[in-house]
Image: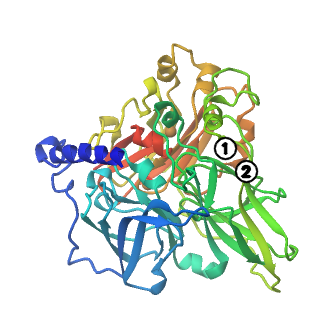
Amino acid sequence: MTHYDHKRREFLQRTALGVMATALPGFVLAEDSQINSRPSNAFKPDVEVEFISQVAEIPIMSGANTSVFKYYGKLLKGPKTSLKTMPGYLGPILNLMRGQKVRIWFYNQLPEPSIIHWHGMHVPQKMDGHPMYAIDQGGKYVYEFEVKNPAGTNWYHSHTHEMTATQVYSGLAGLITVTDEQEQKLDLPSGEFDIPIIIQDRRFTVGNQLQYIHRMRERMMGFLGDTILVNGKANSTIPVKTRAYRLRVLNGSNSRIYKLGWEDSTPLTVIGTDGGLLEKPETYPYIMLAPAERVELWVDFSGRELGSNLELRSLEYHGTMPHMHGGMRHGGRGMGGGMGMMMGGLHQGETFPIIKFYITKKVSDTPTLPKTLVKMRSLTEQEASNPDRPLSIAISMQHMSPQLNGRSFEMYDAMSVEKIPVNTIQKIRISHDNKSMSGGMGGMRGGGMGMMMSMAHPIHLHGQQFKILSRTLKIQDTSDSYATVKDGFIISGWKDTVLVMPGEEIEILKPFEDYTGLFLYHCHNLEHEDMGMMRNFYVS
Ligand code: C2O
Ligand code: CU
Ligand code: CU
């Protein structure tokens, strides 16, 4: 644990300086940067829970237990279903309803600082788990917020400065479901027919301990494990009946991107994305699911043979990792492949099984897939305050330093281009800054080279969900890599994370409503995030 001790010391030194009002830029009030350690009397919670983060010894692989970090939850007030314990290292599932007022007492018992972020939830700055609020071992943070999100699937995870990757990897994550009246009218599969599928990749030592990477080049590519876990278990099989199910799929991995597909090529039926349910179900041959993205699937096992299996797989794809040599599409797997091979692991883009469903029981009736789902909030470009001057999120990895808009993360910093008036809708253009990047990689010029040298980045924005306006490939795809992923992007739904492929430019529309303050935007490749590919928007 020397690594953590070191980080912790560094952190304490930083906070000692950081909380002084004089060290803060004028727009962050000293009061706003303070730990919220007390409940507010005016806030009357409908749901009250306690979360404790602890070191735990959990059986994951056969043999010795694995030492992990785990969130333990306890329901203090509210419906019994509000909190559901998960076996294994994952935190409990938080089941919320739109309109509920939620209070969460977070106690950090880990030997390092930590803070929880409610990913996808629309909450005030102080309740969002910004790393400025990390609390030390023995510390306490009180969250209070109203659930403003529509029905859907969100999640929570630690968001500690420069330690998000290792803490999430060690187990600090869990699922959040939100329900509302619109959803309840639909009578979607519920209870045992509503299943979380949290996909993560890990790497174990012979003694069953979690193994992580620390070398610079490996961190630049992001961590890739060789063991796929679903809901914290390896090689698991889910018994199902011959009827329809709702699967809430979350990619909770540090940097692995999955190309989801059924083994028998049955198309996937999508009913929801990061921001909730779609207007109507859509089918896809496969779905690209980058870190932090969620997709809700409707899967109907009726008509399947008793005793048969159906496997959900990650299918082969290309182009998300930098290629060191041009034109080597299948032979040259790029740096990511190189690393995987060195460590004897699974490459990014390789095909492998994720989870198996085993048909154990015949039942006679099944709900039918609704033709329409929910009425989504509609948003048009005309509503944006800057339709002709989009804000920019330019991704670069200059000099081995992952950056956004030419800058690395600084706790309280927001540039003038990162200031946003509250209660506006902004058009944002996310792109690769290939000029600066190829410059940093030894003077290679843009064009095809730029595409080969860049990698895919799942860009996430805190606060409200956004709509995707367009995805455009700006550079000709000479290697046909893009063709292996392009039919797996869902653009109709609300999103909080979007995978930006090499050469791609993505335009989004995002509301910045209700709350002022600092809200993060970052790459959800957690190694990139910790290396500084994260910035603040300042909403005022
Ligand atoms: Cu899922 Cu800023 O994080
Ligand atoms: Cu988030
Ligand atoms: Cu990235």
Q: Is residue 103 left or right of residue 311?
A: left
Residue that label 1 marks: 346
How many neighbours does mark 1 have within 10 angstroms: few (below 14), some (14-19), or many (20 or more)? Answer: many
Q: Are marks 2 and 1 in contact (CB under 8 Å)?
A: yes
Task: State whether label 1 is within 8 Å of ligand 3.
Answer: no
For numbered disc 2, what is the local secondary structure? strand
Q: How is the image coloured?
A: rainbow
Residue beneath the point at 70% across and 71% down: 238
Which residue is rendered at x = 49% and y = 83% of the image?
81
Residue 145 image position (x, y, % from top left): 34, 69
Please say whether residue 22 is visible from this viewpoint: yes
Helix, strand or loop status at disc 1? loop
Label placed on residue 390: none
* Quarter holding ligand 2: bottom left
| Direction from residue 97 to residue 47 in the image, left or right | left
Amino acid under disc 2: Phe
Q: Find disc 2 in the rendering and name its residue.
A: 352
Residue placed at 16% from the left, 47% from the top? 16
Counting residues from the N terminus, which is met first, the one under dot 2 or under dot 1? Answer: 1
Q: Residue furthest top?
A: 443
Quadrant of the rendered image containing residue 472? top right
